[in-house]
Amino acid sequence: MKPLADISRVGCGAYTYVVGTGAGACVATRPDGAFGMLEFGSLESCLSDLGDALQPYFPRVDLQFAGRSLGSCSTTSLRGAPHQMAARIRESGIAA
């Protein structure tokens, strides 16, 4: 199974993500263990956190931005080079 992560902009310079199996999504948990949306101050920090959350369990993830498919990438690359994926998202025009 490969998870599906949908990243979205929730404000000026703020991003969040949800992760699911394609059949349904669940929200990320906050560091205090409560359920709720996490907000990140940059797309890069959002992608890095996503990689941190998934990498121990999944080698790859299918990505979407605001419901539009971006394809698949390794969770290791999200952790190690989130700026490259962020640039790809921005260049696609989806995050504009």
Image (cartoon, rainbow, N blue to C red):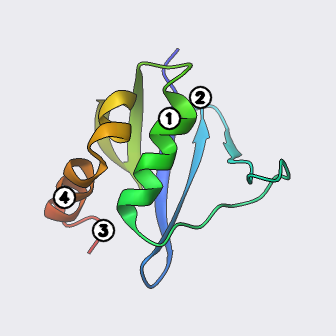
The residue labelled by disc 4 is 87
Tell whether label 1 touches label 3 (CB within 8 Å). no
Local packing at callout 1 (Cα closer than 10 Å; few below 14, some 14-19, many 20+) is many
Residue 56 falls in which quadrant of the image? Answer: top right
User: Is 17 located above or below residue 9 in the figure?
Assistant: above
Name the residue located 14 percent from the left edge and 62 percent from the top edge: 91
What's under tag 3, amino acid-wise? Answer: Ala
Q: CA distance from mark 1 to mark 4?
A: 20 Å
Local packing at callout 3 (Cα closer than 10 Å; few below 14, some 14-19, many 20+) is some
Tell whether label 2 touches label 1 (CB within 8 Å). yes
Name the residue located 59 percent from the left edge and 28 percent from the top edge: 21
Tell whether label 4 touches label 3 (CB within 8 Å). no
Badge 4 marks a residue whose secondary structure is helix
Residue 1, position in %: x, y?
Answer: 53, 14
The residue labelled by disc 3 is 95
Residue 4: image tag:
1
What's under tag 4, amino acid-wise? Answer: Ala
The residue labelled by disc 2 is 21
Q: CA distance from mark 2 to mark 3?
A: 23 Å
Q: CA distance from mark 2 to mark 4?
A: 25 Å
User: Is 43 located above or below residue 74 in the figure?
Assistant: below
Badge 1 marks a residue whose secondary structure is strand
Local packing at callout 2 (Cα closer than 10 Å; few below 14, some 14-19, many 20+) is some
Residue 9, position in %: x, y?
Answer: 46, 71
Residue 75, position in %: x, y?
Answer: 39, 30
What's under tag 1, amino acid-wise? Answer: Leu
Q: CA distance from mark 1 to mark 2?
A: 6 Å
Q: Nearer the viewer, mark 3 or mark 4?
A: 4
Name the residue located 35 percent from the left edge and 29 percent from the top edge: 76
